[in-house]
Image (spheres, coloured by chain):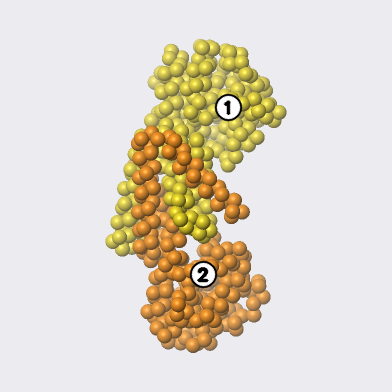
Chain colours: A orange, B yellow
Amino acid sequence: MKKLVIFGVGLIGGSVALALKKAGVDTRIVGVCRTRYSLDEALSLGIIDEAESDLQMAVSDADMIMLAAPVAQTTKILTSIQPFLSQHTVITDAGSTKTDVIASAKAVLGDQFNQFVGGHPIAGAEKSGAAAALADLFVGKNVVITPTADTNANAITAVNDLWRNCGANVSTMSAEQHDAIFAAVSHLPHLLAFALVDDIASRPNAAQLFSFAASGFRDFTRIAGSHPEMWRDISIANKQALLNEITAYESELAMIKQLLINNDSVGLEALFERASHARNQWAKSKQ
Amino acid sequence: MKKLVIFGVGLIGGSVALALKKAGVDTRIVGVCRTRYSLDEALSLGIIDEAESDLQMAVSDADMIMLAAPVAQTTKILTSIQPFLSQHTVITDAGSTKTDVIASAKAVLGDQFNQFVGGHPIAGAEKSGAAAALADLFVGKNVVITPTADTNANAITAVNDLWRNCGANVSTMSAEQHDAIFAAVSHLPHLLAFALVDDIASRPNAAQLFSFAASGFRDFTRIAGSHPEMWRDISIANKQALLNEITAYESELAMIKQLLINNDSVGLEALFERASHARNQWAKSKQ
């Protein structure tokens, strides 16, 4: 791969660039951003080799284009680059939802949809922006790619290679399966954490409640400090899978409520035991 | 205070003992435990000065008795020591719920209920047992005490002094107020985390779901790894306040679900914004 173009050189896009450089991949990395400031920062930090503001120049001879800007910009970026796309260019993304991205790519790219491979690196950090980028961000982390029956085999291979060069473990599944899985293990927990903090913050005695919140509350609500705009977009993009998860969780909560109403301490302890066992086994497996 | 007797020399009881020693308080600290093993460990680690298995010997000349055993043992321990209690002995506890403890103390101690002061140190650690005890566990942490209109002023002062010597900030409120606050900021989050893990663990594709769970899930569910028996007891002991919190949370969740059904991205973003702002302000205030 001679030329990789990254749209959105923030934490994810910047870390891909740094990881490829660290792996010694011989690729010219070109950055495109909404703001000149971000590009200058990425250039001065040596994350990208070039900043390009002319879309045709950036895109026409690219071997791969990665969209790493906020997911809500996907259609706009795809539409802007579509006129300049060569037949050999592979397009991929790094968004947290996939069904919506695949639908957008299919609608915008038309005949060239077979050059698009959806992707989602399961990695992040507290900070955002190019300055927070890390060469090791993806080492040992999962990346899901979601090719369709239409996708070119060489495009799938290229995206696989990209992420393996970043040190990640690549899994392949459908966009629908991806969105169902992440609705359960990521999107629902975020929504539950936002809900708890909003519930407490809206009380007349919120200040008193917060003053007695301690380390359990801190960890449980860490993800409620996440970016509101990003989580609005994820929630809307993955609406149906998320609604299914909320409904399942409401049933679970109703069951626990009933155990409590019934003073069923045996049932409660059994449920807590199942959960704590599963949670501690999971934590061990991740070590 | 010449003699302090601690029932249950685990993380909390052991840390009280170490904190008082570090503060240079001239008090003989006597440990009483269900198991000889724990007492020997606490003795060999220099946490307690004496281990006593004879209740009358332990209790009759004590200036203060602290119950730091699991809350479910409170009534049993109070009943066992009641025959040997002097008029001057202050009794306190370190349990996570207070209404039930106060009711038990009132029922068991009768005329001597005025010598009892409920207490709850808001501090903990991943590990339990005397070996995990830390002299600094309570430094800068909140301790809530819940005296009643009947409680002797000197008993309140003595328990206040104890916790201040451990480096804690002491707040005073009613047992009911305590239980309502901790239902919201501690007991409900624990229950929500147990519910999420149980919900996911009970799926046919649980292994796949867990394999894609990442750092957000890890922090959100950390408290789902907590001790099942302890959380069974807390849930049952604080049943009514916890049911109120579950009901309020169900309303919050139903509201979010409706925003999602309505594709109300403005409403969703506003809610996430309120929550993330409140959460990040809280985190700053705790630094």
Q: Residue at x 64, y 77 (%)?
A: A25
Mark 1: few, some, or many residues within 10 Å (few <14, many ≥20)?
Answer: many
Q: Is residue B35 visible?
A: yes
Q: Nearer the viewer, residue A52 or A199?
A: A199
**As drawn, B256 above or below A24:** above
Which residue is tagged 1? B8
Q: Position of residue B161 (x, y in %)?
A: 54, 25
**As drawn, A240 above or below A273:** below
Residue with the most extreme front position: B204
Q: Nearer the viewer, residue B43 or B80?
A: B80
Which residue is tagged 2? A172
Q: Which mark is residue A140?
A: none
Q: Position of residue A212 (x, y in %)?
A: 46, 39
Q: Secondary structure at mark 1?
A: loop
Would you identify the image quadrant in which residue B139 lies?
A: top right
Which chain's residue wears label 2?
A
Q: Position of residue A230 (x, y in %)?
A: 42, 63
Q: In this rendering, would B21 be left or right of B251?
A: right
Q: In this rendering, would A259 be left or right of A170?
A: left
Q: In this rendering, would A22 be left or right of A216?
A: right
